[in-house]
Amino acid sequence: MIIRKIFNNNVVLTENEAGREIIVMGRGIAFNRRIGSEISSTDIERIYTLSSKGMMEKFQELIASISSEYLQTSNEIIDYAQNFLECKLNESVYVSLTDHIHMAVYRIRNGIEIRNMLLIEVQKFYEKEYQVGLKALEIINRRFNVEMPEDEAAFIALHIVDAQLEFNVPIANRIMQMIHEITNVIRMICKIELDKNSLSYYRLVTHLKFFSKRVLTEQESADEIEDEMSLMVQKKYPKAYDCAEKIAELIFTKYRYKINSDEKFYLTIHIAKVISKK
């Protein structure tokens, strides 16, 4: 293989036998080498063959701007996730997770903490992915000598969930259709236009993405929200709760999935946030 571009001592761009661009990683693989130099397959520890041209360009841009230590950390977490969850993750996770780890370490070293508003939901609905997130924190803390907050475990868990969704294209398409149907209900019942650039809308759609996956895969959750808490939310946000009820009717009629009180509770809160911004 001939080096086409050097990102750092450990990562280079080359081509495979079919003439397709690939990124390869190996300890010291580019040391004392230049563009045009040949590398042996024995020097290669990992090969990245991102099928999307756009994703490959983003990956190249990312690894050219950060230490290879972040990519190594991402590799370790992704390998652990695939073994623990017994599934294959979409290749885009190498870009999204590596970038997230880099920014998370930067934030924590500069005293910037971001709360994850979906922490409780992730812990409840994506227990296994959250366990991966906790393991990821151990790996990151050890490698970079930092102390990541629990919120970061949920952020990483969402990257892992997202990578599973993207890998299953048919489900991903159905999820986007369901999100469209639900947001249409919100628009009609609440008589508002949703601000797609707002943080509350982003949180709503993020919640709906994982909610839709649960519906389509018939993944039921236990009722854990106390009745008193649920009633309090109904009284505080009557319009949002009414909208959640209409969404529940739509989901049952079209998908034969009965939304429980916990699902309605979280839907109501997210809808209320969107409405309050209007």
Image (tube, rainbow, N blue to C red):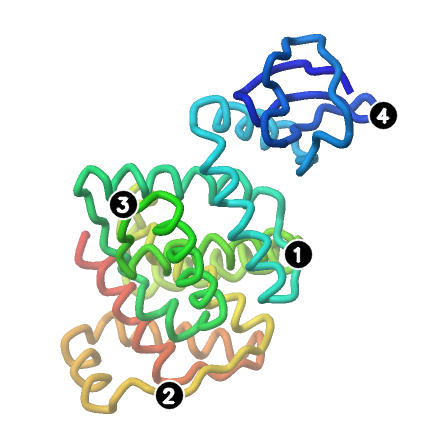
Distance between the alpha carbons at the discs numbered 1 and 3 = 33 Å
The N terminus is located in which quarter?
top right
Rate crowding at label 3 as few (under 14), some (14 to 19) or many (20 or more) other CA atoms within 10 Å. few
Q: Earlier in the sequence, mark 1 or mark 2?
A: 1
Vertical position of residue 74 compared to residue 40: above or below: below
Q: Residue furthest right?
A: 17
Of the residues tagged 3 and 4, which is closer to the observer? 4
- How far across and how far down the image is residue 50, in percent? 66, 35
Distance between the alpha carbons at the discs numbered 1 and 2 = 30 Å
Q: Earlier in the sequence, mark 1 or mark 3?
A: 1
Distance between the alpha carbons at the discs numbered 4 and 1 = 25 Å
Q: Is residue 183 left or right of residue 23?
A: left
Circles 3 and 2: CB atoms closer than 8 Å: no
Q: Earlier in the sequence, mark 4 or mark 1?
A: 4
The residue type indicated by label 3 comes to: Ser
Of the residues tagged 1 and 3, which is closer to the observer? 1
Q: Nearer the viewer, residue 121 or 65?
A: 65
Image disc number at residue 17: 4
Vertical position of residue 221 compared to residue 194: above or below: below
What residue sits right under mark 2 in the picture?
223
The residue type indicated by label 2 comes to: Asp
Circles 4 and 1: CB atoms closer than 8 Å: no
